[in-house]
């Protein structure tokens, strides 16, 4: 009986040690061990979108590939429901959220965020022939907006008490306005610059006023050491010109935030 008790105690101690290791294990080491960085994204040009071959490209996609290469792992992009991004991250369905994510207070509370790397704003998108009618906050009060669920755009229209419907992605919000099923949309300024106006699929749309100013960042699981690793990479990539080279490819260089090593 004593021998059985001793064996049981040893087993319990071993399980306890495994639990402690699992809780304290480095998130960076977890990614290194599996050999792949899984990045949660949505279809969001010019940050993450598919080329004619179905490959994910964009400023964020290219920069994520460069970071994965720095770690010595491959990268996998997983399209997620933006409203469930925190659940996806905590469940380890993805290792980070890297998709023009605004660093809001709720995001920073729920994730371990790396330093901001790009400036942005939320802007109002309307049919081009009605742009002159919607140049002030007051002029928006009778409109119905389409906004991405869980986005900074949704937060802005909600804070202003405007009428809105939630859709799955910012691209869907543009479709709503183009189809006249919503009066307007609120999306990221960088996306608006890339996706609407002359020479795009939404030549009949334009953007008018900005509702805020904000910054983009990458989110990891709370307590993850990958955030610090990304900060170091961003400084290196800024100094050697990698970030600006990628930014120039997608014409977003004016929005890039200088990356400086912590003192």
Image (cartoon, rainbow, N blue to C red):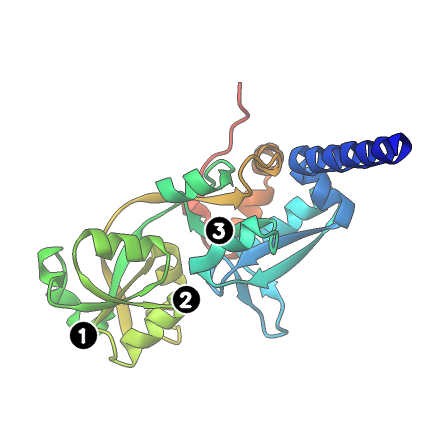
Q: Residue furthest bottom?
A: 179
Q: Does 259 sit above or below residue 149?
A: above
Q: Residue at x 90, y 32 (%)?
A: 3
User: Which quadrant of the rendered structure holds the N terminus?
Assistant: top right
> Dot 3 corresponds to which residue?
86
Q: Does 234 sit above or below residue 101?
A: above
Q: Nearer the viewer, residue 81 or 257?
A: 81
> Dot 1 corresponds to which residue?
129
Q: Is residue 174 left or right of residue 253?
A: left
Q: Residue furthest top?
A: 263
Which mark's residue is nearer the viewer, 3 or 1?
3
Q: Position of residue 20 (x, y in %)?
A: 69, 33
Q: Earlier in the sequence, mark 3 or mark 1?
A: 3
Q: Residue at x 55, y 56 (%)?
A: 40
Q: Quadrant of residue 2?
A: top right
Q: Earlier in the sequence, mark 3 or mark 2?
A: 3
Q: Position of residue 207 (x, y in %)?
A: 26, 62
> Dot 2 corresponds to which residue?
169
Spatial CA span between label 3 and label 1: 39 Å
**Element type at mark 3:** helix
Q: Nearer the viewer, residue 161 or 47?
A: 161
Spatial CA span between label 2 and label 1: 24 Å
Q: Is residue 104 visible?
A: no
Q: Is residue 189 left or right of residue 93?
A: left
Q: Is residue 140 visible?
A: yes
Within 10 Å of disc 1 (Cα), the crowding (few <14, some 14-19, many 20+) is few
């Amino acid at each position: 009986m004593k021998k059985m008790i001793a064996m049981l105690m040893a087993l319990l101690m071993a399980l306890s040690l495994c639990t402690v290791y699992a809780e304290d294990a480095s998130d960076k080491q977890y990614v290194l061990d599996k050999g792949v960085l899984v990045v949660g994204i949505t279809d969001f040009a010019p940050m993450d979108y598919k080329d004619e071959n179905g490959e994910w490209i964009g400023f964020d996609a290219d920069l994520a590939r460069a970071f994965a290469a720095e770690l010595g792992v491959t990268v996998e992009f997983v399209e997620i429901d933006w409203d469930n991004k925190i659940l996806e991250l905590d469940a380890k369905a993805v290792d980070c959220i890297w998709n023009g994510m605004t660093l809001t207070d709720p995001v920073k509370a729920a994730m371990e965020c790396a330093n901001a790397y790009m400036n942005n704003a939320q802007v109002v998108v309307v049919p081009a022939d009605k742009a002159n009618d919607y140049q002030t906050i007051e002029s928006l009060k009778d409109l119905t907006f389409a906004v991405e669920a869980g986005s900074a755009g949704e937060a802005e229209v909600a804070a202003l008490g405007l009428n809105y419907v939630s859709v799955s992605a910012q691209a869907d919000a543009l479709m709503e306005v183009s189809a006249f099923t919503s009066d307007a949309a609120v999306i990221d300024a960088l996306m608006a610059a890339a996706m609407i106006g002359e020479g795009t699929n939404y030549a009949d749309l334009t953007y008018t006023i900005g509702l805020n100013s904000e910054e983009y960042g990458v989110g990891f699981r709370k307590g993850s050491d990958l955030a610090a690793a990304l900060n170091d990479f961003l400084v290196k990539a800024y100094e050697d010109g990698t970030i600006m080279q990628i930014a120039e490819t997608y014409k977003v260089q004016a929005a890039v935030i200088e990356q400086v090593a912590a003192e």
